[in-house]
């Protein structure tokens, strides 16, 4: 069928000269065509093909061509077929050893062509000398096995020499493979015609090529050809062909049997003398033809684009399975919900029936998932051979195309969006003794608020590893400050004292949960309670004309600060807004609490819930979620003691899980009212503003403060009261991050400073102080950034919930670092090359 493709394309009608044309087929290039833009290498390839064809086609870099025209024009097979029509340089080269022109040292033993010449794309590296005597014996055995014209020619050459190795015989590797596998002479080394054909002979040859293509298409129903002029095919086949549209062009032609013709053929073959088995087989064959006809008649998905993630839904996936095939599978399968099985097995049948027509989303998605989790070529190729997923080569091509299509641009970025960057170190095998396989790198991530969503189609193109490596490559400049340009001293300016009562809008909400705990147990934990009652609407670089905002953890923050401070006033670095990572600051503060409470019995209390090794990890500040929950539980136990001291609240015994009615009746009336307020608040009958302004909670807070002052006379009580103060600061910081409260964020960090110093966290005490002093001047230095931070954009959100803010450095840990170090990441045996890191 491909014999037909090039002459028809070359013979297409001329279009207007003002339109942009393809220099090969001379047809106009429309926006709906599949067009390629030639690079320097592509232009040289087309010009080389033109020289081999003895044409006058000359191209240059940046010129546009039809993709199909370029592929056909530069295909060595088509070049060899075109050269058959003209005189070839190697015309009349004899094949037999009996002719004087044949030389074992110059010509290929199999095809008889010159072995030291470059024909088509075959290079000199394709030529090999005969090195062993067993080679000649094997060739003689193959000649007996083939018993065709080519075997007779090769045997004739072998008769005139007894030792090919001694005769320095040469051969083409391609010819040797074809001869051994019982194939014919490679097209690139086929003997050329003795003379050029006349015009009448060419027309006859074209007609024969068309009849051959038509016969081939009829015998191979799953094959397709792409042509421009379809008149001859339509005249020959009539309604037995289907013309599918891809990208708005009628260019895919597929042979099909109509349902009417299949049923007509089936009823003609009905014979009452046939057995039941033969009749059953005939029915199944007719049904199979109808199914295949419907598959071939369906709209073909273009292979120029990969399926998007939107097509993975059940509704979109089912459209790739014809209705008749769905009916068949629904009849066969049993179970309540068989849609997924119908989609997966149905797409496997469609792919097997027409492997060159479709790019099915489930097959591609399964291969991508397996490659991400296991990175096993054997597993993917095994499932591909069974028909369940795409091939390993296709999966790798998809990942490269996805990386190339995405690049490093931010999709759907608008001027009103707020852009900030987050960077963090990533290390792998850093503790090896020999230093081999050690990787030290840095990952950087851009975050946009409000989020921009959109799907960009992924083009199926050829992408090299070098192109992928250049996509996200950042040029590294080594910073070497001079001796006179070092930051000799750091002046700590006075911080503006921030009253937490002015910025903390959740103080009474938090107190209500602590007060109600003894009488409403069991009840949600602190995080669940805050997420349940916190409601409302969340607030909404130089390349993008935005001041760059970059977040680092403490070591990188201090290095970046030194670089920015040492730059001159005209430098672009002065426009960078540096932020200290809130998540790492929280970890350091948790470690400070663990160090200050060492030897107090906190370790033993936490061991009643967690294992000993886990508690050691928690008190160092690493297991963040565990230690926050543990500290909150200990604070609740302390507040129950405060409530017992301030009000008549009985404690549950060791065998009780709740307070009895008799016990609750002995409580002060004010505590009962607070519990009733809690019930209404959780039920949604009270608002956050009404709770904050509640006189009941104000009175309870006054009594609790008086009780704490009385308990401060004891050193042990003072220690645990100090613990409650630290956990209160922790809860305020978490509220600031989850709700996007910028002032509360700065206020809670300011309250952490004395505890950083007391615990010996000097680096964070120093960095946090400088960070606060810079952020308090943000309204003057960077008013636009300050406006976004006041609107709550200093945190990131991945959901629409009000209680869902995340610190920027926590987000990079959850997304980028997790993808690098978890299953399917770079540290899981994938390699650390430039292309892997870019993908």
Image (cartoon, helix red, strand yellow):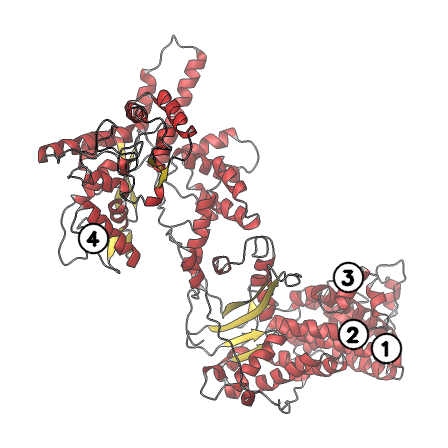
Q: Which residue is drawn at 41% across and 70% down?
A: 414
State the image coordinates of residue 773 (x, y, percent, origin top left): 60, 86
Q: How many labels does the image show?
A: 4
Query: Where on the picture, by quarter, is residue 826?
Result: bottom right
Secondary structure state at the residue bearing disc 1: helix
User: Horizontally, is 332 left or right of 669 in the view?
Assistant: left
Q: Nearer the viewer, residue 561 or 151?
A: 151
State the image coordinates of residue 437 (x, y, percent, origin top left): 59, 59
Residue 675 visible in the current orientation: no
State the image coordinates of residue 288 (x, y, percent, origin top left): 40, 26
Q: Name the residue under label 4.
A: 22
Query: Where on the picture, by quarter, is residue 718?
Result: bottom right
Secondary structure state at the residue bearing disc 4: loop
The disc, 1 or 3, on the residue closer to the chain's N-terminal end is 3
Compared to 574, does 447 lie above or below? above
Mark 4 or 1: in front is: 4
Check whether the beta carbons of the residues at disc 4 and disc 3 lie within 8 A of each other: no
Q: Mark 3 points at which residue?
A: 614
Q: Mark 2 points at which residue?
A: 595
The disc, 4 or 1, on the residue closer to the chain's N-terminal end is 4
The disc, 4 or 3, on the residue closer to the chain's N-terminal end is 4
């Amino acid at each position: 069928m491909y014999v037909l493709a090039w002459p028809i394309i070359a013979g297409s009608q001329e279009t207007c000269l003002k339109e942009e044309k393809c220099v090969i087929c001379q047809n106009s290039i429309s926006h709906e065509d599949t067009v390629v833009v030639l690079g320097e290498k592509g232009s040289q390839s087309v010009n080389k093909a033109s020289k081999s064809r003895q044409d006058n086609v000359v191209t240059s870099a940046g010129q546009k061509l039809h993709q199909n025209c370029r592929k056909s024009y530069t295909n060595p097979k088509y070049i060899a077929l075109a050269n058959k029509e003209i005189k070839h340089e190697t015309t009349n080269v004899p094949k037999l050893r009996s002719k004087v022109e044949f030389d074992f040292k110059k010509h290929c033993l199999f095809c008889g062509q010159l072995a030291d010449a470059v024909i088509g794309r075959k290079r000199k590296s394709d030529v090999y000398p005969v090195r062993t005597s067993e080679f000649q014996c094997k060739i003689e055995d193959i000649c007996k096995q083939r018993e065709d014209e080519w075997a007779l020619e090769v045997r004739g050459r072998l008769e005139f020499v007894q030792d090919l190795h001694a005769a320095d015989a040469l051969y083409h590797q391609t010819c040797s493979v074809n001869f051994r596998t019982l194939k014919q002479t490679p097209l690139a080394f086929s003997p050329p015609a003795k003379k050029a054909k006349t015009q009448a002979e060419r027309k006859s040859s074209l007609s024969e090529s068309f009849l051959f293509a038509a016969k081939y298409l009829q015998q191979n129903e799953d094959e397709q050809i792409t042509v421009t002029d379809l008149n001859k095919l339509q005249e020959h086949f009539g309604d037995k062909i289907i013309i599918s549209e891809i990208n708005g062009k009628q260019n895919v032609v597929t042979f099909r049997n109509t349902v009417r013709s299949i049923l007509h053929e089936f009823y003609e073959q009905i014979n009452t003398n046939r057995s039941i088995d033969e009749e059953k087989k005939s029915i199944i064959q007719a049904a199979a033809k109808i199914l295949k006809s419907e598959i071939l008649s369906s709209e073909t998905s273009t292979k120029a684009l990969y399926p998007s993630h939107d097509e993975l839904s059940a509704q979109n996936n089912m459209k790739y399975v014809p209705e008749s095939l769905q009916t068949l599978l629904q009849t066969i399968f049993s179970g309540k919900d068989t849609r997924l099985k119908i989609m997966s097995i149905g797409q496997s049948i469609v792919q097997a029936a027409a492997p060159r027509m479709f790019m099915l989303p489930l097959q591609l998605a399964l291969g991508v998932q397996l490659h991400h989790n296991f990175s096993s070529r054997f597993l993917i190729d095994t499932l591909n051979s069974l028909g369940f997923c795409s091939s390993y080569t296709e999966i790798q091509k998809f990942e490269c195309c996805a990386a190339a299509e995405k690049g490093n641009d931010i999709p759907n970025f608008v001027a009103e969006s707020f852009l900030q960057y987050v960077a963090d170190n990533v290390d792998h095998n850093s503790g090896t003794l020999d230093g081999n396989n050690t990787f030290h790198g840095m990952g950087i991530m851009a975050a946009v608020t409000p989020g921009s969503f959109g799907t960009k189609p992924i083009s199926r193109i050829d992408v090299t590893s070098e192109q992928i490596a250049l996509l996200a490559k950042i040029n590294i400049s080594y910073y070497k400050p001079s001796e006179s340009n070092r930051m000799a001293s750091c002046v700590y300016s006075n911080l503006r004292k921030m009253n937490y009562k002015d910025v903390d809008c959740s103080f009474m909400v938090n107190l209500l949960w602590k007060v109600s705990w003894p009488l409403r147990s069991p009840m949600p934990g602190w995080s669940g309670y805050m997420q349940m009652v916190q409601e409302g609407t969340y607030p909404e670089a130089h390349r993008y004309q935005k001041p760059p905002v970059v977040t680092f953890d403490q070591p990188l923050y201090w290095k970046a600060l030194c670089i920015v401070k040492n730059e001159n006033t005209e430098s672009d670095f002065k426009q960078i807004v540096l932020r200290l990572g809130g998540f790492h600051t929280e970890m350091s503060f948790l470690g400070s609490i663990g160090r200050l409470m060492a030897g107090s019995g906190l370790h033993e209390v936490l061991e009643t819930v967690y294992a000993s090794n886990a508690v050691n990890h928690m008190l160092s500040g690493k297991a963040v979620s565990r230690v926050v929950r543990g500290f909150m539980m200990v604070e609740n136990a302390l507040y129950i003691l405060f409530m017992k001291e301030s009000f008549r609240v009985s404690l549950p015994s060791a065998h009780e899980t709740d307070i009895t009615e008799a016990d609750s009746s002995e409580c002060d009336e004010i505590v009962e009212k607070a519990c009733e307020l809690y019930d209404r608040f959780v039920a949604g009958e009270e608002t956050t503003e009404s709770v904050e302004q509640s006189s009941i909670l104000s009175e309870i807070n006054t009594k609790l403060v008086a009780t704490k002052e009385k308990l401060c006379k004891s050193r042990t009580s003072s220690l645990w009261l100090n613990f409650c103060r630290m956990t209160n600061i922790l809860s305020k910081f978490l509220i600031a991050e989850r709700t996007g409260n910028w002032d509360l964020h700065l206020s809670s960090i300011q309250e952490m400073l004395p505890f950083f110093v007391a615990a010996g966290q000097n680096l964070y005490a120093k960095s946090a102080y400088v960070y606060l002093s810079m952020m308090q001047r943000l309204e003057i230095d960077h008013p636009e950034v300050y406006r976004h931070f006041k609107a709550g954009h200093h945190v990131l959100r991945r959901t629409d919930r009000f209680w869902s803010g995340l610190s920027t450095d926590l987000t990079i840990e959850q997304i980028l670092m997790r993808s690098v170090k978890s299953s399917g990441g770079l540290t899981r045996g994938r390699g650390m090359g430039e292309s892997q890191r870019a993908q």
